[in-house]
Amino acid sequence: MSTPVRFAILSMAHVHAPAYAAALQALPETELVAIWDDDSERGLRAGTNFGVPCYVDLHDLLRRDDIEAVIITSENVNHRDLALAAAEAGKAILCEKPIATVIDDAEAMIAAAQTYEVILATAFPVRHNLPALRTREALRSGAIGEPIAIQATNHGTLPPGWFTSRDRAGGGAVMDHTVHVADLLRWYLGQDPVDVYAEMSNRLYGLSVEDTAFLTLRFPSGVVATLDPSWSRPPSFPTWGDVTMEIAGTRGTLQLDAFAQRLVLSPAQSQHVEWIGWGADMDRAMILDFARAVRNGTPPAASGRDGERALAVVAAAYASAQSGRPEAVAAPPD
Amino acid sequence: MIRVGLLGAGMIGQVHADAYATLPDVEVVSVAGLGAERAARLAEALGATPTIDIMAAAADPRVDVVDVCLPTALHQQATEVAARAGKDVICEKPLALTLEAGRRMIGVCRTARVHLLPAMVVRFFPQYQALAGAVRDGAIGTPASCTLVRQGFYPSGSGGWYRDESRSGGIFLDLMIHDFDWALARFGPAERVFAQLRHAGSVPFTQGMATVRHRSGVLTQLTGTWGHPGPFTTRIEVAGTGGLLQYDSRDSESLELLVLAAPEDAGDVPLPNLATTDNPYRTELLHFFEVISGHAAASVTAEDSLRALALALCAREAARTGRPMAVPSEAA
Ligand SMILES: NC(=O)c1ccc[n+]([C@@H]2O[C@H](COP(=O)([O-])OP(=O)(O)OC[C@H]3O[C@@H](n4cnc5c(N)ncnc54)[C@H](O)[C@@H]3O)[C@@H](O)[C@H]2O)c1
């Protein structure tokens, strides 16, 4: 690649923001040049950490012509406004998942990217997780024949701060943890689910949002996938959570544990065992893929539409929890 | 000395026979099976007499207790014949294929004043007992959710009866009944169940998936697989306000034998690897004989197994209709 793609990070609100900033600085193909944050204290701290200026006025940052791309890592509900402003300023956009909290917002973002002819990508790093990629290759090569049924998990610990606020996150565990697996399933099977059944509860933490859920997704091919997106790993759990999938097919079964490549650390000073992942860095791979898309005009691994399609599964899950029935996953426009 | 008539000399009959060989104060006097050769082999090992007349064996005046290890479709008839002849009855799971049949079995045994002890063996597996004990002791606070998985190869049974849903009840009744029972015993009655069933047209593969909302508010997700290509696998996970408890049979092999050539026959029905646990089938039978001789109260009752059957039937129906089913309260 020629010159590095110059990035700004819009908001340090999301827990992934520091990792993305570090990846931007580590990769020769990318450069972090600025940060914007509506929380000026948080922004200044990040700016100092990463040695870049932090803006308090979004438009001052977006006016800078040398910035080609932004990563949006704000609270979920703010994705829309930030993306619209960035698109209007002609910046390529990599937006943290979920792309938005409601379909209308996602559609507005997709439309703005089209209008201003900028790339809109959704941050689905698990597409860049090597075991998850190998799973797709194995499926495509017919290793297990035709898929029949899938058991998936994307467990997590209770996330901090705004993640548990309905107003800012748009929901709880289902909003936070459904889209990674929903996206993988679409990517693996090449189709959207027909409908979703969901049972939810908030028994673990008693918050206004759900912490526990079991989803069942039915696909046009007949494949049925169950998904547990619960925040059911306690604070003592050795890591943040998991992404696992067992895919049974007509010729065999694939068992994916996306983060099984780990060391086990038993510290003398603590009660808690820790897992230290040593697998290939999926965040870097995702950012590199996006930077190449910006530089070469190629499509990124996961588009804004992919983000909206995964969000449609979330919307169906919430509708199902309301109605007590399986609810259809809305079709994309035309 | 308690004298037992063993009905069924198939896969589970063999497992029970192995346990009887080690039980004190219990004597198997007859072994009944259609395959005369197999019944004869089991009988010889136990010093019993073999027979192919199964219902006569159920009423054999020489026996005190009848152990029904027959295909599920025969449980009701064998139980009623034995009970009317005054025998206590141990009956393999699932209790019956329908609630009406199960209720009649319970009624006939009650009228005859004999025990009806359902072989819900998972209750006697040490890891499931340890997990239930830890949950009961509050190790994870208030439970919120539970995941139960049970996967093995596709059983056939004498004459292929497992593969005929009208004779085995299918995977919800035959395999997943264990986990339905375990969830009901831990988390209380079910409010509703949603379920899906998948078959592979071309190969013997079946996966049942169910989500249960208990009246207590706990959510349970269950998966059962026939045709799983790996070793027999069971998993449990319970998440609560005070932590997380997990069991995975794949992590628990404290002894593994790796052989160069694959063994010729893998057996008829998937069974857990028992080599490194207290044999739960023996624990189960030992407990039942304590109940029969009046030394213990039954830790699992025919009513428990009827409730599990009711939930399994609701799950099967939910899978057929694609709609969640309300679980009737008398059954729940
Ligand atoms: N608790 C467990 O872990 C467990 C495991 C396997 C089976 N089971 C239950 O045990 C019972 C027996 O299962 P199995 O696997 O031993 O069956 P099987 O087919 O291996 O054996 C059945 C026995 O019943 C005899 N039999 C009598 N009449 C028959 C008929 N009309 N058709 C077929 N066989 C007939 C057979 O000759 C044989 O001796 C079933 O209810 C099953 O669900 C329980």
Image (tube, rainbow, N blue to C red):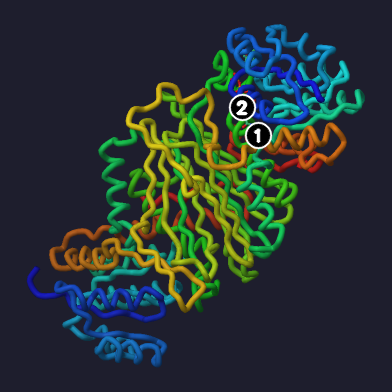
Q: Nearer the viewer, residue B255 or A176?
A: B255
Tell me: B274 left or right of B73. left
Mark 1 CB near ligand 1 (8 Å cut): yes
Badge 1 density bin: few <14, some 14–19, many ≥20, Cα 10 Å: many
Task: Please give the residue where the numbered disc 2 appears in the rendered image.
Answer: B15
- Measure how far apart labels 1 and 2 are at the Cα level: 7 Å
Task: Please give the residue where the numbered disc 1 appears in the rendered image.
Answer: B281
Can see residue A194? no
Q: Nearer the viewer, residue A24 or B104?
A: B104
Q: Quadrant of residue A13?
A: bottom left
Tell me: A48 left or right of B70. left
What amino acid is labelled 1 in the image?
Answer: Tyr
Can see residue B296? yes
Tell me: A280 left or right of A160. left
Q: Position of residue A92 (x, y in %)?
A: 24, 71
Above or below A163: residue B304: above
Q: Quadrant of residue A8?
A: bottom left
Q: Chain of mark 2?
A: B
Tell me: B271 left or right of A275. right
